[in-house]
Amino acid sequence: MSQNPYDKVKLARDSSRPTGVDYIKNLFKNFIELHGDRRYGDDAAVVGGVAYLNGKPVTVIAIEKGHNPKQRALRNSGAPNPEGYRKALRLMKQAEKFGRPVVCLIDTSGAYCGIGAEERGQGQAIAENLMEMSTLCVPVVSILIGEGGSGGALALAVADRVWMLENAIYSVISPEGCASILWKDSAKAETAAANLKLTAQDAKSFGIIERILSENDLGKPDFYDRIRVMLSEELDALSQDPDLLQKRYDRFRRIGADVNNEPIKGM
């Protein structure tokens, strides 16, 4: 396993990694996809619907990148528009109405920052998700399966439990974007990656996530079987917790409370 944070960035972006749709096909049964945000349209970058996990109904929402150029064009390379986040929120509220747990699978470099997305309220859509997810009365587990970029990832990660694959990343900005801002040189992305503390191991040490998932047999049946068991057990436990909302609130209040800020190298 590589110890270089930027090597992990490359692994997280690898087009051969399982994407959200791969997880849906292999973790769940009888998935029925639902479309549209009931305001503007459908966003193919966000795939969501109802499925069964070990015989129990759940709502599944995934940010999907695609594997090849044709799929990535269809999915906007996993960069959701506002309607994608609004679709996700619509499905979460539907899950709350019918008492279904929610599973989010996150793999995005960030929300789409095009003019149209901004005109249709990208920032507001993300903010609404953050607010509404914090008060959902059903269990929510979010798993970062590849890239977790900025508010685009956080919009599906205000959860009771947040997990990451061991080579996934979670960051406020891409290493290239950070390097361009701080040093006016995107070639210093490797240095930026080291300072951003974006690895799963960093996130675990800061209390941002609860669990790091091994990538042994990544994409193989044993890999999905292992995650299915952990996910089912976690949702069962959360479903029986009478203090779910308070504990979710406390979880986010604790993040970073005991972390000492370190100066950025090279500044």
Image (spheres, rainbow, N blue to C red):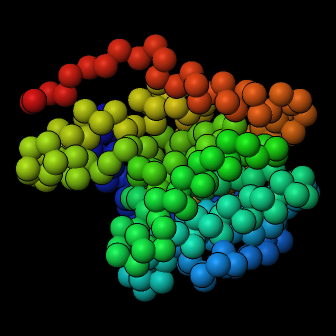
- Please report the residue visible at 59 percent of the width from the left and 48 percent of the height from the top: 130
Horizontally, residue 263 falls left or right of residue 82, namely: left
Q: Quadrant of residue 234?
A: top right
Q: Nearer the viewer, residue 199 or 208?
A: 208
* Image vertical order of residue 252 relative to residue 12, above or below: above
Q: Position of residue 174 (x, y in %)?
A: 30, 51
Q: Looking at the picture, tell me which residue is in the foreground, 124 or 19.
A: 124
Q: Residue 224: x, y in percent?
A: 67, 53
The answer to whether one can see residue 66 in this image is: no
How many numbered tags mark residues here? Answer: 0
Quadrant where the C terminus sits is: top left
Q: Quadrant of residue 63?
A: bottom right
Quarter of the image where the N terminus is located: top left
Residue 55: % across, % down:
91, 57
Identify which residue is drawn at 42% across, 82% down: 73
In the rendered image, the vertical position of residue 61 relative to residue 77, given as above or below: above
